[in-house]
Image (cartoon, coloured by chain):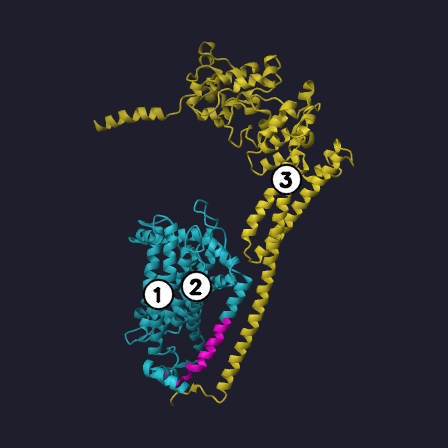
Chain colours: A cyan, B yellow
């Protein structure tokens, strides 16, 4: 009976092709294999975000009048609402952290080399989308800190040369952060970004299946053992996912994500207002740049600099390989280490100062 | 030609920009001894900042370098004004609406009129030059705006300024008034609030007036206190104690219980115990003493209940539990405690009991909310431990499954040699 049902489905869906893929997909086993897990953890955490986000949608109301109270209702009245919201918030932060680790592991193992340029580019866009999720989701509880952090964040966006003021106006839905901003950020957070992200994740994974897992250039691909993905590697991956779930559980139960005070646009900004940790390095850099550098406005120059840096980083497969398609390992590793040191140091400085 | 034109425009402009000549300051600032002092002090004077000079009070011609001209009677020089003439001298400008409009259009111009009604003014008029005139409070030659923190009449410095004379036993001897007001005031809640930076807290002038300074009479004490403590005064006015206290000799009204200059933080120690002010009139065991004890018990009970709730909510909050609603509600409870303290001034237990009852209900409700949150925290930790246990078991089970699966090296594909 079961065999018949499977056959029936196979005839219509082509399951044998999937089975074939499952049978043939392997993962190279070498000293850097552990870094392969980070892509999977990022995907797992994104799944957690989807599930908890949908659950939060049942109660959240995206209006200035009700936004904060609805989140408080979730935290205090809804059964396990506190758990769902805390996991959503903690998972969002872990997701961005893990995505950064995944990205730098790809750079340091030089997995961006041909033919994986599009995998790299789609990954960079996905990281940008994750930051977009973080930025838009941060405002939704409509509390004092998130309100003023969004003001600061959109001010930075307004500093983009040329199109900055227009971007800020489009994001805010007006001249300042207010009711239109909340509904815009909500629409972005629950509809626009998820649609794009899900599509792009599918593309990213498809490319990984198409090109297989990359082996670092210092390891001869032909000489490494491979491990079957199904079920051997996947079981290991599930173990790691369970570990991530346990970490989330501990964070949510012992350090529930705080709610703060309802946003009051007429109150003065809370002391030491700063964006979330993943924007701190950029924020601190902008603070350090003098108000005027030569004939340019300091902030404008800073934002333009970040733009150039981001484009340059996305073009890594272009400048990170030589004409023969081999990685310029020293150059890229050096740049990556400098970038990691910069992000770590400036995030820390932004947090302390 | 162009240069001449520019010069013609610039010269008058430069002349206008020059400060007006002041031979008084020029000469006196290079002299020795007390005669030099005014010329040095006047740099900080608000009048100087507004373009006035020595001659505007002392007369004379400040434009002349010749002392016999600059200080000639023909030029209106009056020298050092007589002490009794100082209030009128200041009022020449400060009493003129037309003049003051040019500098401080919103400033009152009735200081001299008020001064004449004050004890100081009346005694000065009677020939007693020992009393305060304008310069004794506002200083002279370095007069600063009232809001200037260095002004002797700035709220933070006013008590000391009044105390300079009123704490001087020698000066006050002939008037037969006490000299311990400043000493007492500095122990008071009012001074404590002022020191903390609350410039609206009362100083001497808030109760006694400034230019029209005089002690409040017995019948006006409640009105003086009531100008800030409005609701307390309203209840007290209707209370059974009002006629009794007002009839008290040597002072009445609020000061019967709260004293005057050394007003302390009102606690239930005023109602019961060795320092109870009620016991001054109500003998122990009398209905009045029993009522006072009952009121103290209610107030202390509500205070303790609210503090307990607050401690439990704070603990829950620090543990990351969401108790902000209960914390806001606790604010209502504290408001009821204030209302109960206010209602005490009716001296009717039933009036006080209403807010006490409402406050106790809120204290219990918020305590329950806090305890529920703390319990919830424990449940969460337990849930975490249980789910952690199951996660650990699952991970171990997967690990064992992998070991079993790969027991004979299956799952690995060796490289082609």
Quarter assignment of residue B260 = top right
Q: Position of residue B94 (x, y in %)?
A: 48, 20
Callout 1 secondary element: helix
Q: CA distance from mark 1 to mark 2?
A: 14 Å
Query: Alpha carbon of mark 3 to alpha carbon of mark 2: how far?
Result: 48 Å
Q: Is residue B273 left or right of residue B235?
A: right
Q: Which residue is mark 2?
A: A53
Visible residue check, residue B156: yes
Query: Given this view, does label 3 or label 2 mark the residue nearer the observer?
Result: 3
Q: Residue at x 54, y 30 (%)?
A: B154
The residue that label 3 is drawn on is: B340
Name the residue at the left extreme: B1
Residue, disc 1: A195
Q: Are marks 3 and 1 on the same chain?
A: no
User: Magenta span covers which residues?
Assistant: A221-243
Q: Which mark is residue B237?
A: none
Q: Quadrant of residue A38?
A: bottom left
Front residue of A166 and B89:
A166
Pointer 3 chain: B
**Residue B19 percent across, percent down from the top left:** 40, 24
User: Label 1 is found on which chain of the structure?
Assistant: A
Depth check: give the residue in front, A36 or B33. Answer: A36
Does the magenta run of residues contain A291? no
The 10 Å Cα crowd at callout 2, few under 14, some 14 to 19, many 20 or more, is: some
Q: Secondary structure at mark 3?
A: helix
In the image, residue B276 sits, relative to residue A98, either above or below, namely above
């Amino acid at each position: 009976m079961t065999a018949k049902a499977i056959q029936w489905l196979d005839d219509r869906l082509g399951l044998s092709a999937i089975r074939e893929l499952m049978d043939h997909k392997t993962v190279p086993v070498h000293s850097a294999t552990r870094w392969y897990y980070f892509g999977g953890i990022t995907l797992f955490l994104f799944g957690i975000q989807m599930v908890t986000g949908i659950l939060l949608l049942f109660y959240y109301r995206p209006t200035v009048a009700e936004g904060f109270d609805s989140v408080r209702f979730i935290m205090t009245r809804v059964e396990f609402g506190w758990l769902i919201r805390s996991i959503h918030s903690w998972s969002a932060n872990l997701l961005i952290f893990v995505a950064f680790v995944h990205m730098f592991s790809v750079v340091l193992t030089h997995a961006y080399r041909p033919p994986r340029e599009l995998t790299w580019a789609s990954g960079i866009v996905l990281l940008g989308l994750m930051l977009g999720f973080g930025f838009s989701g941060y405002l939704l509880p409509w509390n004092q800190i998130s309100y003023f952090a969004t003001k600061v964040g959109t001010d930075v966006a307004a500093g983009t040369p040329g199109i900055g003021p227009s971007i800020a106006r489009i994001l805010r839905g007006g001249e300042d952060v207010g009711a239109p901003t909340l509904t815009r950020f909500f629409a972005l957070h629950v509809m626009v970004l998820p649609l794009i992200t899900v599509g792009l994740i599918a593309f990213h994974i498809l490319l990984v299946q198409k090109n297989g897992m990359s082996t670092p250039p210092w390891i001869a691909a032909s000489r490494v053992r491979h491990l079957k993905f199904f079920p051997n590697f996947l079981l290991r991956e599930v173990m790691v996912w369970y570990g991530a779930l346990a970490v989330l559980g501990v964070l949510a139960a012992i350090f529930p994500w705080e709610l703060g005070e309802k946003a009051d646009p007429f109150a003065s900004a809370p002391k030491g207002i700063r964006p979330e940790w993943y924007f701190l390095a950029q924020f601190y850099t902008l603070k350090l740049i003098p108000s005027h550098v030569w004939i340019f406005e300091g902030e404008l120059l800073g934002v333009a600099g970040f733009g150039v840096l981001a484009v340059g980083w996305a073009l890594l497969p272009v400048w990170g390989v030589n004409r023969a398609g081999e990685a310029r390992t020293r150059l890229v590793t050096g740049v990556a280490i400098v970038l990691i040191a910069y992000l770590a140091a400036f995030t820390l400085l932004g947090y302390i100062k | 030609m162009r240069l001449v034109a520019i010069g013609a425009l610039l010269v008058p402009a430069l002349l206008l920009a020059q400060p007006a000549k002041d031979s008084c300051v020029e000469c006196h600032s290079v002299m020795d001894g007390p005669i030099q002092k005014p010329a040095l002090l006047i740099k900080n004077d608000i009048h100087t900042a507004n373009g006035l000079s020595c001659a505007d009070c002392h007369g004379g011609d400040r434009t002349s370098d010749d002392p016999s001209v600059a200080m000639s009677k023909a030029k209106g020089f009056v020298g050092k004004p007589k002490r009794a003439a100082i209030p009128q001298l200041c009022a020449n400008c400060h009493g003129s609406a037309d003049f003051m409009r040019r500098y401080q259009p919103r400033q009152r111009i009735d200081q001299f009129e008020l001064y004449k009604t004050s004890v100081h003014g009346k005694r000065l008029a009677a020939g007693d030059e020992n009393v305060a005139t304008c310069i004794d409070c506002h200083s002279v030659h370095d007069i600063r705006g009232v809001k200037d923190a260095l002004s002797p009449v700035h709220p933070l410095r006013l008590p000391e300024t009044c105390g300079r004379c009123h704490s001087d036993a020698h000066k006050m001897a002939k008037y037969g008034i006490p000299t311990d007001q400043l000493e007492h005031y500095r122990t008071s809640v009012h001074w404590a609030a002022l020191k903390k930076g609350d410039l609206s807290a009362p100083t001497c002038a808030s109760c006694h007036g400034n230019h029209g300074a005089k002690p409040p009479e017995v019948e006006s004490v409640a009105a003086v206190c009531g100008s800030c403590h409005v609701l307390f005064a309203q209840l007290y006015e209707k209370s059974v104690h009002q006629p009794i206290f007002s009839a008290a000799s040597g002072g009445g009204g609020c000061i019967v219980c709260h004293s005057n200059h050394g007003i302390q933080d009102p606690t239930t120690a005023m109602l019961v115990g060795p320092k109870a002010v009620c016991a001054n009139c109500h003998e122990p065991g009398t209905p009045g003493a029993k009522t006072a004890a009952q009121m103290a018990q209610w107030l202390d009970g509500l205070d303790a209940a609210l503090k307990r709730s607050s401690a439990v909510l704070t603990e829950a909050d620090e543990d990351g539990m969401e108790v902000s609603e209960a914390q806001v509600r606790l604010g209502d409870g504290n408001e009821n405690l204030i209302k109960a303290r206010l209602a005490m001034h009716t001296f009717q237990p039933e009036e006080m009991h209403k807010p006490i009852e409402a406050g106790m209900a809120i204290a219990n409700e918020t305590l329950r909310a806090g305890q529920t949150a703390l319990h919830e925290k424990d449940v969460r930790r337990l849930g975490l431990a249980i789910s952690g246990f199951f996660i650990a078991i699952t991970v171990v089970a997967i690990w064992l499954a992998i070991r079993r699966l790969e027991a004979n090296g299956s799952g690995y594909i060796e490289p082609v040699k």
